[in-house]
Every structure is written in structure tokens, then in C-alpha cells.
Image (tube, helix red, strand yellow):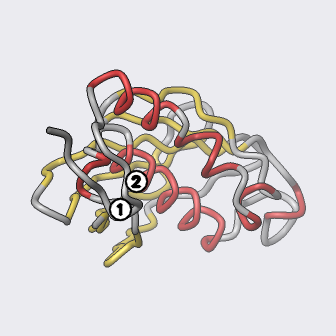
Amino acid sequence: MGTTDDAGAVGLDDERQRHLRAAVPAAMLATPYLSGLGLVFERYEPDDVTVRLPFREDLTNDSICYHGGVIATVLDTTGAAAAWSNHDFARGTRASTVALSVQYVGAVRGGDLVCHARVVRRARELIFTEITATDDAGAAAAHAVQTYRIA
């Protein structure tokens, strides 16, 4: 006897779970807001995700340094992707960021923004992630902790 999720899907075996997880990056990048950013998934493994934002002058404060809101967006998106990367879809598909705390420690000047997220803990509905943002040379720009909910 299979399980039923919020959408009424029955029988989410391992193969179906892998298929649903693999579809997450494309689904995220197809959303209206994210589709305009030009994000690139470099790594999408269970509980371990890296996303790159190729440099765009129009997303900077001064034609050189990325705006902090852009960095926060990519941190949040990368953390959310990590949460989905190993999610049990039988538990549901409604999701949102519950909390995001960002500490800016540097700037991304004239180059790509790279964010790496890892899941720290999975609870019943809450997933806790840590995310780092660096420039393309690996210099730290920000660190974030995120609480994400999928139910």
C-alpha cells in the first residue's frame, strides 16, 4: 500500500523520489523572479548545493559590487535548493523560508557570486541550512543560516 502526499500522489518509491528531486533546479529557475537572474546550478547533490550568479552590472550598487539584496536572494535560493535536494516528497510540497539570517563579511567585486549550502538538520517539517557566499576566487562575502519549511 502506497502513501499519499498533499497532491494525492500514491506510491512515491525511491525512483520517483529521485526524479522529483532532480526536477527541482529547473522548477526553481522557471519561477518568475528567479528566471530573470540567470542563476546556474553547479552542484545539486543530497544536502549539498552550489549555485553561481554570473556577474551582472545591473545587479550592483555601483557597477562593481553586488547589492546585498541580490546576495541575500542567492543565499536564500541556494539554501532552499539544499532543503529540496534530499526531501521526502511523500511529506508534502508546500514550502517557504521561515527565517534567514545573513552576515555580510565582504563584497563581490566585478565577478561571479557563488553560494554553497549544506543541510545541517532535517526535522519533521523544518530543514536547517548553512550557506556561504563567495566571489569567484573564493573570498568570503556573506554567511547565512536558514530555516526552511516543507509540509
> In the rendered image, which residue does mark 1 sit on?
144
Quadrant placement of the N terminus? top left
Pick the front one: 127 or 138: 127
| 79 lies left or right of 12 | right
Kind of residue at badge 2: Gly
Question: Which residue is drawn at the image coordinates 28% and 37% (left, top)?
Answer: 11
Residue 61's x, y, as percent?
78, 72
Position of residue 49 measured from the top left corner of the image (x, y, whole percent): 42, 36
Number of other residues with Cα within 10 Å of mark 1, as a class: few under 14, some 14 to 19, many 20 or more: some
Q: Pointer 1 and pointer 2: residues touching (CB < 8 Å)?
A: yes
Give the CA separation, mark 1 to mark 2: 9 Å
Secondary structure type for disc 1: strand
Kind of residue indicated by mark 1: Ala
Badge 1 or badge 2: first in the primary sequence: 2
Q: Nearer the viewer, residue 123 or 38?
A: 123
Q: Nearer the viewer, residue 129 or 21?
A: 21
What residue sits right under mark 2 in the picture?
A: 79
